[in-house]
Amino acid sequence: MILKRFLTYLGMALLVTACYQFKEPKKPKNLISKEKMVDILIDSKIIGSSNITNRRIMENHGVDLKTYVFKKHNIDSLQFVESNTYYTFHIKEYNEIYQKVKDSLEVLKVFYQNLEKKEIAAAKAKRKQDSLQVITTIKDSISNLKITDSLKTQLTKKVLKDSSFLNKKVAKFIDKTKNLSEQPSKKLQEVIESKPKN
């Protein structure tokens, strides 16, 4: 939108310049400085090159793309057209402005490409760190299982080695159950003997 509007104003300025037939336009009272023109043109190019998704995001955040550049730089469209017309007539100055715009856009492009590379590298490093953490956790779990299994094995071996301890426990158990099994049979025999015979 802004790029279209900018191109419209630029076309009008070129048309006005062509109509003047080399007659120099008067210097506007509110002429925009070269430095400010560079900033305005940079912002116009950036907004003009934004894709549909970025434009929707800006509009959703209350940015009016048609008037954004003018509001940002506190100018109006007439002031821009008059200043642009003046600079287009003075082609040397206009070339200086556009060279600065081109250089600035190139610097911004390199800056954002480097920033993107850093973000990608940081994301890769984070994924790698997360993967290492998962691997470490798995290794720790496996080590804990091995230790637990090792302790169980050692305990089993100790119990089996110490057969005298086990033999004593088994002998006590057998003695207790033997006494229990003998008592009911004695009682049963006493009952049978005490029964009167027919």
Image (cartoon, grey):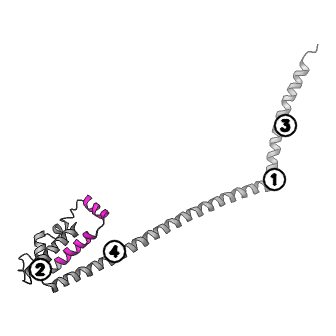
Picture coordinates of residue 191 (x, y %)? 87, 21
Magenta-span inclusion, residue 59: yes
Can you identify the residue that label 3 sits on?
178
Q: Quadrant of residue 100?
A: bottom left
Q: Earlier in the sequence, mark 1 or mark 4?
A: 4
Q: Quadrant of residue 190?
A: top right
Can you identify the residue that label 2 sits on?
18
Q: Residue at x 27, y 77 (%)?
A: 105
Cα separation between marks 1 and 3: 22 Å
Q: Earlier in the sequence, mark 3 or mark 2?
A: 2
Q: Are marks 3 and 4 in contact (CB under 8 Å)?
A: no
Q: Earlier in the sequence, mark 1 or mark 2?
A: 2
- Along the viewing direction, whichever of 114 and 149 lies nearer the viewer: 114
**Is residue 105 toward the left or the right of residue 89 in the image?**
right
Depth check, mark 3 against mark 2: the one in front is 2
| SS for dot 4 | helix
Q: Amino acid at mark 1?
A: Ser
Q: Earlier in the sequence, mark 1 or mark 3?
A: 1
Toward the top, the furthest residue is: 198
Q: Residue at x 70, y 56 (%)?
A: 152
Q: Residue at x 16, y 68 (%)?
A: 70
Residue 106 drawn above or below residue 75: below
